[in-house]
Image (spheres, rainbow, N blue to C red):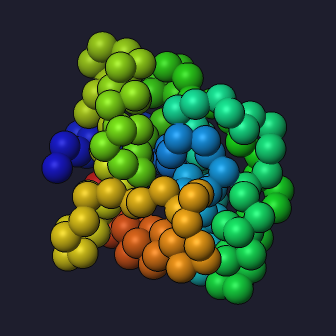
């Protein structure tokens, strides 16, 4: 797995009080990436780390810019104690690679779209979210958009496992 240099994040966090910034990216920013944003936000709140890590989500395509997450994603989130209703879809921009420390794609297709817009020298920030859950032996979070409710449940299960691994990675880098 490609990783961000420890010195890049920890020195900045300790010298100017900047947060670690994490961006979750899927295609339309209405299913997987807002789910990941909500899951990771809840995890950070539970761990008392919300003040240290900034989170956002975006899509590689502009199909749903300005819209809230898919109703089915919101319903699944509510059943798990997470409110996604305040989130709105936006499209990822090359500038996001300068703003965020982690740019996490949900699948290979989105990874390739992100790779195409990534400014030179910042590709070390781009990873697949599932790289943080190697024990699950899956590299992608599948798009549940055209499927039934079980697809949204599967997305939550995968994202929750990867969120734990991501937090562990951030903690390790900042210690």
72 or 25, which is in the foreground? 72
Q: Quadrant of the C terminus?
A: bottom left
Q: Position of residue 164 (x, y in %)?
A: 39, 73
In this rendering, the answer to whether 64 lies above or below 106 is above
In this view of the protein, can residue 165 be seen by the observer?
yes
The residue located at (36%, 48%) in the rendering is 107
93 to the left or right of 164 = right
Q: Is residue 151 left or right of residue 38?
A: left
Q: Nearer the viewer, residue 88 or 14?
A: 88
Instruction: Identify the residue at horizontal 35%, vertical 20% (top origin).
Output: 116
Residue 99 image point, x, y percent: 52, 30
- Place residue 3 in its image quadrant: top left
Furthest-top residue in view? 120
Does 69 sit left or right of 39 as displayed? Answer: right
* Image point (36%, 38%), residue name: 109
- Please state which of residues 121 and 51 is positioned toward the viewer in this rendering: 121
Place of residue 110 in the rendered image (x, y in percent of width and height, measured from the top left): 41, 38
What is the x, y in percent for residue 103? 42, 40
- The answer to whether residue 21 is seen in the rendering is no
Q: How many marks?
A: 0
Q: At 74% from the left edge and 34% from the top edge, which residue is drawn?
A: 65
Residue 138 shown left or right of residue 67 in the figure: left
């Amino acid at each position: 797995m490609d990783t961000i240099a420890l010195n890049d994040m920890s020195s900045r966090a300790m010298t100017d009080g900047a947060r670690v910034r994490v961006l979750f990216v899927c295609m339309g920013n209405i299913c997987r990436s807002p789910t990941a944003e909500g899951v990771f936000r809840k995890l950070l709140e539970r761990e008392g780390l919300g003040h240290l890590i900034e989170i956002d989500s975006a899509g590689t395509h502009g199909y749903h810019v300005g819209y809230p997450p898919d109703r089915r994603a919101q319903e699944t989130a509510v059943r798990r104690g997470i409110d996604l209703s305040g989130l709105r879809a936006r499209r990822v921009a090359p500038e996001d690679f300068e703003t965020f420390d982690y740019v996490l794609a949900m699948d290979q297709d989105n990874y390739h779209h992100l790779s195409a817009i990534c400014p030179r020298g910042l590709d070390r920030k781009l990873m697949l979210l599932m790289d943080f859950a190697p024990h699950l032996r899956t590299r992608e979070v599948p798009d549940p958009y055209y499927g039934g409710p079980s697809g949204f449940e599967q997305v939550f299960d995968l994202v929750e496992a990867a969120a734990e691994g991501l937090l562990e990675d951030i903690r390790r880098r900042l210690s």
